Image (cartoon, rainbow, N blue to C red):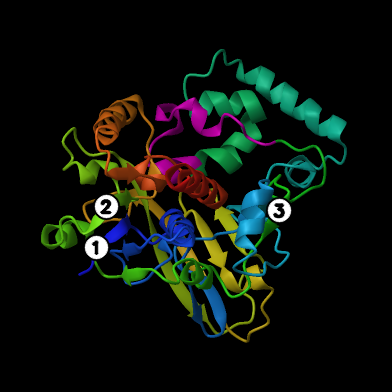
Amino acid sequence: MKRYDYLIVGAGLFGSVFAREAMKNGKTCLVVERRAHVGGNVYTEEADGIVVHRYGAHVFHTSDKRVWDYMNEFAAFNHFVNSPLADYHGERYHLPFNMNTFRELWGVTTPEEARHIIAEQTAAAGTGEPQNLEEQALRLVGRDIYEKLVKGYSEKQWGRDCKDLPPYLIRRIPLRFTYDNNYYDDTYQGVPIGGYTPIVEKLLEGADVLTDTDYFDFIRGHAGIAAKTIFTGPIDEYFGKRYGELEYRTLRFEAETMPTDDYQGNAVINYTAQDVPYTRVIEHKHFDFGTQAKTVVTREYSAERQAGDEPYYPIHTPYNLEKYEKYLALARERGDVIFGGRLGEYRYYDMDDAISAALDLAAKELG
């Protein structure tokens, strides 16, 4: 095989944006992707005329005009606004927590009434400096919202009792005292018409792309194939887990096609009761305001990551962060490898964050 300027490991947003910028600057790129498709977790595909988000709901949102304009070079976006619901034993509540939620919980209709109830409940909780997620939630939103809309969902999401979870996970619970169901505060929001996969395919035009290709297997037979490597896989795996494995939560998805034109009337419904095994149900056609005779729904389950599972959410305990710092020190010694993206940097990236970070890296790397 020919020699490249860059070997890019992973065809998600970070790697694909960097490849695009490198090629614009006259560089040659080889992209290797272990999955059978490009796009990473934003991969979409069509089923029964419906664009399906195979790895969970992805609503693009940002306040960064540079990123918004960049994405609009590759796709037109619709005007979808993310307004999820929460289900607690059949009771339905609007998210994020706003006046609609408070009316549904307590029958109040004014911000003053809602503030009064929340103030009473947070005072009754009597927590000092929060030492765990439960104390943090009680201090911020009171007992009712915690018990119905935070506790069960958080424990399913992280696989631990709220008393054993760090407070920072919900340090900034949004409380809106307006009737506003828009989940995000960002300036720009929408879903690309036709899905995310066509965007990634356009980003990668001109690159050589190998899917179904494990980097570690590939590089054993192709050492020196590129002057530099952009590695977006797990940083601990790159270094042979020398300091131990970095922990993640994983997700499992169960998709089902149903012979109805509308299953739940909303794109996303979170199930906050502990006795419901999944965390949310996604009905994909609502992202595109679909009118198809059928519908596709996906139930999403959170689980401890086992060998072979896809890593999704980094578990930022002091123990894991200490290990990551050791891997980061090793990474800084490698002048020919740059680690990026959610796995390479052991952090959670929103889509716009990943794009912005890739653009920043390209500007730094390519001048």
In the rendered image, residue 208, in percent from the top left (x then y), is placed at 34, 70
On screen, 150 above or below 203?
Answer: above
Mark 1 neighbour density, 10 Å: few (under 14) some (14–19) many (20 or more): some
On screen, 339 above or below 278?
Answer: above
**Residue drawn at (49%, 70%) of the image:** 197
Q: Earlier in the sequence, mark 3 or mark 2?
A: 3
- Mark 2 touches mark 1? (CB < 8 Å): yes
Question: Can residue 251 be spotted in the picture?
Answer: yes
In the rendered image, residue 359, in percent from the top left (x then y), is placed at 52, 49
Mark 3 neighbour density, 10 Å: few (under 14) some (14–19) many (20 or more): some
Closer to us: mark 1 or mark 3?
1
Residue 188, which numbered label?
Answer: 3
C-alpha span from label 1 to label 3: 40 Å
* The magenta segment: 154-174
Label 1: element kind: loop
Residue 227, which numbered label?
Answer: 2
According to the picture, the residue beneath numbered tag 1 turns out to be 3
Could you say which is closer to the camera, residue 1 or residue 134? 1
Q: Is residue 193 left or right of residue 222?
A: right
Mark 1 belongs to which amino acid? Arg
Mark 2 belongs to which amino acid? Ala
Q: Earlier in the sequence, mark 1 or mark 3?
A: 1
Residue 217: name its quadrant. bottom left
Mark 2 neighbour density, 10 Å: few (under 14) some (14–19) many (20 or more): few
Question: Can residue 84 be spotted in the picture?
Answer: no
Residue 333: name its quadrant. top left
Q: Is residue 2 left or right of residue 359?
A: left
C-alpha span from label 2 to label 1: 8 Å
On screen, 291 above or below 303?
Answer: below
Mark 3 belongs to which amino acid? Tyr
Could you say which is closer to the camera, residue 243 or residue 54? 243
Residue 214, which numbered label?
Answer: none
